[in-house]
Image: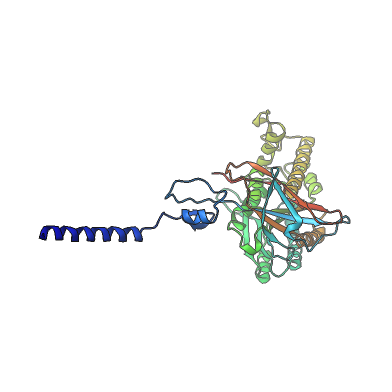
Amino acid sequence: MSILVKSCLLLIVVTAVAAQQITQQPSQRPRRVNGSEQTTEAKKTSGGSGSEEVDEGDVVRVDTQLVSVPAVVTDGSGRPVSGLKPENFRLIEDGQPQTITNFGTTETPFEIALLLDTSGSTRDDVALIRAAANSFIEALRPGDRVGIVAFNTAPTSDKPIAAVEVLSALTDNRESLRGAIENLGSSQGTPYYDALERVADSIFRDAPSEDVRGRRAIVALTDGVDSSSNSDFATARVKLSRAGVACYFIQVNTEDFVEDRLMKDCNDDGQLALSQKQIQRYRELFFPKAKSENFDSFCQMGPFERMSISRELYNLARREMNELARASGGRSFAAATLADARAAFARVAADIGTLYSLGYYPTNKARDGKFRSIKLEVKGLKDKTQIRARDGYYAPKQ
């Protein structure tokens, strides 16, 4: 009888312990989808539609890129249209309608990278560039933040080289920005592509805050002719596209100044030479099958050959700036001289002040690095309108 009683008591204790362990153990490990944690049971009660099938107990993290689309809407007379709402827009990616999840009105603050080209023919006119840059900053709204990038001469053990310099990170402190502009230097070369890449990697390195998401731009005062970059146009273009930056260019015309000095003798103090990087880039783009040694020496080239190379490089620069502006939803403005830059900056500031910003999470979640086209339409308006927006983006890679 004593053995039987002890056995019954032991069975009761074991059963109670097992029941307590079952009560304390969660039904399954939480899984993270789009930043939220849900158990499988919770996913069932909330519908869970559109989620990936996963094994029980797995933790899933889905990182989806928010695509930003800055846009300007104008009426039949070219005047900006204000007061639009998300329901006035229809957004399509690769033929598939998308859901607009973020929307910024024209009053929402902006973040702007100001790139000032102080190389070549502009070196003697830094004072004009300072004045134009300061007037541009004053034309912006109080909440807008600006970062400043320029060129300078970096001393080396061999000889001075042109370098990209970040004079100011993004800030809305106008006094700090004026001080940065006052420190504007100059360079003997033009690392223009490196500067575009630096804007994407440095000025816009961090993800934007919610209030400025989709409202970022680069405003560049330059002739767009690169002479010393390690980067190239294709790399800079992809990085700016992935950063969702609207590109604005004030195209300064320095062609006559440069060509006049290219024609001088190499021993002339006023002579200006094409860099070896410029000459080789010209060969690779226009005569890829030509021998590299045929383009080794600038001084051995005839005046007409120098002129031809210069004109091709200037035409290339204008095409690249116009392409970046069009593809990103920005604009290009011509400035015949640096004296015209102030007026061009005023037009850029006015244009930025009319930008809407839309954002969406694409239904295509593939991280394949491929280009995807964007089409933005306006609906619900009686008057005929025109819309300017970026034409696509590059998907992230694995």
* Spot occupied by residue 184 in the image (x, y as percentages of width and height): 67, 61
Q: Is residue 109 left or right of residue 337?
A: left
Q: Looking at the picture, does residue 141 appear above or below residue 46?
A: below
Q: Is residue 49 left or right of residue 327?
A: left
- Picture quadrant of residue 263: top right
Relative image position of residue 97 (x, y in whole percent) = 69, 48
Q: Residue furthest right?
A: 77
* 336 left or right, relative to 195: right
Image label count: 0
| Residue with the most extreme front position | 1
Q: Is residue 251 visible?
A: no
Please state if 32 lies on the left or on the right of 199 as rendered: left
When the figure is inspected, residue 106 is found, relative to residue 99, above or below; the finding is: below
Q: In the depicted view, which residue is nearer to us: 391 or 280? A: 391
Q: Nearer the viewer, residue 150 or 39?
A: 39
Which quadrant does the N terminus fall into?
bottom left
Q: Nearer the viewer, residue 160 or 193?
A: 193
Most distant residue in the left direction: 2
Residue 343's x, y, as percent? 82, 61
Can residue 197 be seen here? The reply is yes
The part of the image, by quadrant, that contains residue 183 is bottom right
Residue 12 drawn at (x, y percent): 23, 60
